[in-house]
Amino acid sequence: MCKKILISFLLVAIFNLLGCYSSELVTAAEYKQVEEKDGKPNEIYVKTKDYQGYHFSESNFYIENDTLYGKVMVRGMSFEGKFAFWEIESIQLEDFGQKHPSLMTVSQYQKIEVKSGKPDEIYLTKNDSTRYHFRKNDYYIKNDILYGKGKLIIDREQQLDRKIALLNIESIQFEYFNGAATPLLVLGFLVIPIVVVLAIFIISSPSFGLK
């Protein structure tokens, strides 16, 4: 009987601890209803219909007139544009199975492309030191201009303003932490395994004397 009581107590404690945290994936319309009912969650993860992902904390976003406004931490962002050759300081190639100089001028790159074809990836650095990443099928050169669709590389994580129309949002994953859930979860993951092992050891010990 005492064994059952002890095991039941441990299970209830674990479920209560884990119950301090909740996460759910919804549409933008469903999320608005959730926020109206339960208030803003602690965090949301937004996926747009063009496959971009954004993470917002509670104090860094709000919804107004069917648009989500917020600040996100990013290390890269989508880019589409063109570069005149005189704007390009250097190009670095990532060509799997081939060896090339780590950095080269545009004219050096053109010779390699004519001889060996386009590399798998390139990293382009402009004269103002900004860097861009393009995959093989996402850029081309025409009339001394490089056109591309890729990523603007941000060397340090930066906080940028974002405005996303709710119509362009594929899904929102939101997370609630009740009270001191975060420290409790950390403590729980550390303490619960120790408690369970000790309980099993005590229960299985002949000196426990419970039937």
Image (cartoon, rainbow, N blue to C red):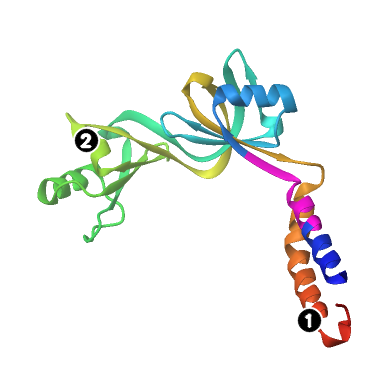
Q: Nearer the viewer, residue 105 or 53?
A: 53
Q: Residue furthest left?
A: 115
Q: Nearer the viewer, residue 88 or 151?
A: 151
The first of marks 1 and 2 along the sequence is 2
**Is the N terminus in the top left, top right, bottom left or bottom right quadrant?**
bottom right
Task: Please state the extent of the stretch shown in magenta in the rendering.
Answer: 12-23
Give the x, y percent position of residue 96.
25, 57
Give the x, y percent position of residue 176.
71, 39
Asked if the magenta segment contains residue 20, the reply would be yes
Residue type of the residue flagged with mark 1:
Ser
Secondary structure of the residue carrying numbered label 1: helix
- Which residue matches tag 2? 140
Relative to 166, is 139 on the left or the right?
left
Secondary structure of the residue carrying numbered label 2: strand
Any part of residue 21 in sight: yes
Q: Residue at x 46, y 34 (%)?
A: 52
**Is the C terminus in the top left, top right, bottom left or bottom right quadrant?**
bottom right
Give the x, y percent position of residue 177.
74, 42
Q: Residue furthest top?
A: 65
Say above or below: 69 vs 156. above
- Which residue matches tag 1? 204
